[in-house]
Image (cartoon, rainbow, N blue to C red):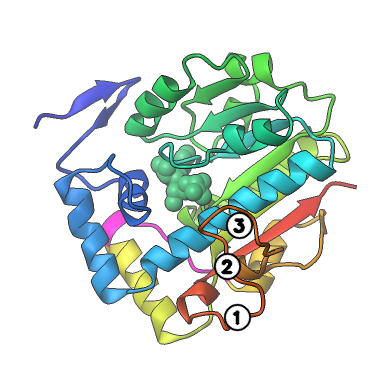
């Protein structure tokens, strides 16, 4: 199949995409043979890849629900949002607060096509095609300004995105930009590959770097330092499955108190607030 061009970038079925491999691991159908091939390498060499993807998604769902229910925040910017899946940010937020508004941001052309198809009839959501490493481009994009009122608190969602930003691309600078451009009371949800300094981490990092030239596992302290100047709320930066676990109806959520698998230790989550 030939590559298709969309907003200057092309959907290339011959080249694996982070978004499509992740979709495959989550059991989605928006992926090509080349993505499944890489996904199968992950599943073979890192048998916990699927657990990591589900633990991540479940923590994101819990965080959005918590933000919508407890903070009064009604606007979300979801950076590196990924392909639409079972429970997307606007669906979770609007279930609890129907007036919630969401800007999805991604650079994968397939995410843009599918995202826009899903959101066609939703006047409180937009999909913006700007690189997360260009926060000003996202902030000043007309679609963002149409949806988000920057005089009111915003939830900035950094779910499984900053580990795709290498150290020399200044991931902390991305967070700092948003911290400086949202009002007090705004919050930041982060999930991130978590380094346990163990062989699984080293192997996982190697596979990602070889495939995509990016993928950085960071320690809890390194992840916390990305949130510099923000107040990290309880329970801190912890394995995603331990981030405010509950018994909700979401089948991806973990049981409180059970022993985590070695893989679940490889994805961390945390919520921070701008004072
Ligand atoms: N946030 C979702 C979640 O947690 O389930 C999806 C995470 S997925 C692992 C990472 C997403 O980030 C992919 O959809 C990929 O296309 C997107 N991405 C990677 N680098 C990006 C960049 N520099 N700018 C915008 N999006 C990016």
Q: Residues within 10 Å of mark 1 (few under 14, many from 20)?
A: few
Answer whether residue 15 is visible to the viewer in this image: yes
Q: CA distance from mark 1 to mark 2?
A: 8 Å
User: 162 or 160: which is nearer to us?
Assistant: 160
1 and 2 marks in contact (CB < 8 Å): yes
User: 114 or 257: which is nearer to us?
Assistant: 257
Q: Main secondary structure of the magenta part?
A: loop
Observer-side mark, 2 or 3, equals: 2
Q: Does label 1 point to a residue whose CB lies under 8 Å from ligand 1?
A: no
Q: Is residue 84 left or right of residue 154?
A: left
Q: Is residue 16 left or right of residue 96?
A: left
Q: Which of the labelled discs sits on residue 59, or is there none?
A: 3
Q: Considering the numbered disc 3 on the image, is that residue within a helix, a strand or a loop? A: helix
Q: Residues within 10 Å of mark 3 (few under 14, many from 20)?
A: many
Q: Does label 3 point to a residue whose CB lies under 8 Å from ligand 1?
A: no
Instruction: Farthest residue to the left: give it.
Output: 1
Is residue 207 placed above or below 145 in the rendered structure?
Answer: below
Q: CA distance from mark 3 to mark 1?
A: 16 Å
Q: CA distance from mark 2 to mark 3?
A: 9 Å
Q: Which of the labelled discs sits on residue 258, or is there none?
A: 1
Q: Residues within 10 Å of mark 2 (few under 14, many from 20)?
A: many
Q: Which residue is mark 2?
A: 254
| Residue 139 inside the magenta-drawn segment | no
Q: Position of residue 247 (x, y in %)?
A: 65, 61
Q: Quadrant of residue 47?
A: bottom left
């Amino acid at each position: 199949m030939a590559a298709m061009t969309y907003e200057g970038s092309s959907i290339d079925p011959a080249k694996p995409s982070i978004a499509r491999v992740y979709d495959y691991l989550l059991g989605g159908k928006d992926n090509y043979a080349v993505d499944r091939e890489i996904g199968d390498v992950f599943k073979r060499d890192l048998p916990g890849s699927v657990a990591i993807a589900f633990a991540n998604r479940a923590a994101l769902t819990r965080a959005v629900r918590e933000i919508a229910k407890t903070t009064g925040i009604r606007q979300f910017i979801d950076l590196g949002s990924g392909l639409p899946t079972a429970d997307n940010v606007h669906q979770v937020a609007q279930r609890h607060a129907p007036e919630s508004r969401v800007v999805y941001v991604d650079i994968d052309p397939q995410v843009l096509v599918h995202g826009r198809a899903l959101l066609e009839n939703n006047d409180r959501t937009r999909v913006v095609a700007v690189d997360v490493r260009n926060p000003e481009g996202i902030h000043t994009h007309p679609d963002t300004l149409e949806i988000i009122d920057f005089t009111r608190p915003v939830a900035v969602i950094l779910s499984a995105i900053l580990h795709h930003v290498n150290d020399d691309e200044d991931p902390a600078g991305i967070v700092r930009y948003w911290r400086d451009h949202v009002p007090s009371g705004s919050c930041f949800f982060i999930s991130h590959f978590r380094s346990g300094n163990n062989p699984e981490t080293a192997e996982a990092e190697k596979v990602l770097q070889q495939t995509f030239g990016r993928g950085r596992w960071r320690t809890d302290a390194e992840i916390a330092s990305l949130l510099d100047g923000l107040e990290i709320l309880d329970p801190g930066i912890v394995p995603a499955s331990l981030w405010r676990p509950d018994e909700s109806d979401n089948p991806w959520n973990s049981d409180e108190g059970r022993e985590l698998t070695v893989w679940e230790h490889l994805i961390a989550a945390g919520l921070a607030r701008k004072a």
